[in-house]
């Protein structure tokens, strides 16, 4: 997510083709590493919960993919610029990057305790 934030920042602050090249490279890095999100999900919550969690996360993700181009189009039609869209996505990318950095693997579940006196 940090690479996506840098890509968005490049589009906002750098003029010309250099901004586009930086955006493409940095977003490619972000998208290339996004598969690690699913790997982390499996490692953190195990195989038994993986499909359920992936399904729930995918619903939210896909709703965002549906709304984002509509939002960007409406903003562009009203302002003749994508700057507002990029500025609105920058804090989202930054917060997501911070949350990823704060993520730690949860402790393994406690083993069931054996009953005293063989019960």
Image (cartoon, helix red, strand yellow):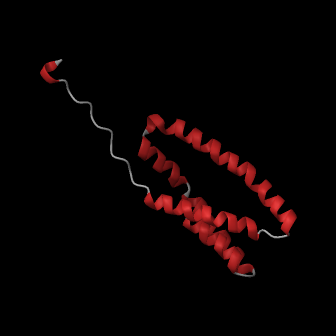
When the figure is inspected, residue 65 is found, relative to residue 24, above or below; the finding is: above
On the image, the x and y values in percent for residue 37 come to 52, 52
Residue 47 appears in which quarter of the rendering?
Answer: top left
At horizontal 37% and vertical 47% (from top left) the residue drawn is 106
Residue 19 appears in which quarter of the rendering?
Answer: bottom right
Q: How many marks?
A: 0
Q: Is residue 44 left or right of residue 93?
A: left
Q: Is residue 48 left or right of residue 61?
A: left
When the figure is inspected, residue 60 is found, relative to residue 100, above or below; the finding is: above
At horizontal 78% and vertical 60% (from top left) the residue drawn is 72
When the figure is inspected, residue 20 is found, relative to residue 41, above or below; the finding is: below
- Relative depth, front residue between 53 and 117: 117
Where the N terminus falls, by quadrant? bottom right
- Relative depth, front residue between 29 and 63: 63
On the image, the x and y values in percent for residue 22 come to 65, 75
Q: Is residue 110 left or right of residue 39?
A: left
On the image, the x and y values in percent for residue 71 come to 78, 56
Where the C terminus falls, by quadrant? top left
Q: Is residue 48 left or right of residue 63?
A: left
When the figure is inspected, residue 84 is found, relative to residue 67, above or below; the finding is: below
Please identify the residue farthest to the top as the structure is shown. Answer: 119
At horizontal 81% and vertical 70% (from top left) the residue drawn is 81
At horizontal 49% and vertical 58% (from top left) the residue drawn is 99
């Amino acid at each position: 997510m940090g690479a996506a934030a840098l890509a968005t920042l490049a589009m906002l602050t750098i003029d010309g083709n250099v901004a586009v090249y930086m955006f493409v490279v940095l977003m490619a890095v972000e998208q290339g590493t996004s598969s690690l999100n699913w790997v982390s999900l499996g490692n953190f919550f195990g195989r038994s919960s993986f499909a359920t969690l992936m399904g729930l996360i995918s619903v939210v993700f896909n709703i965002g993919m549906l709304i984002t181009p509509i939002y960007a189009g409406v903003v562009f039609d009203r302002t003749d610029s994508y700057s507002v869209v990029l500025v609105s996505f920058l804090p989202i990318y930054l917060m997501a990057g911070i949350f990823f950095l704060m993520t730690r693997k949860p402790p393994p579940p406690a083993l069931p305790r054996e009953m005293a006196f063989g019960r």
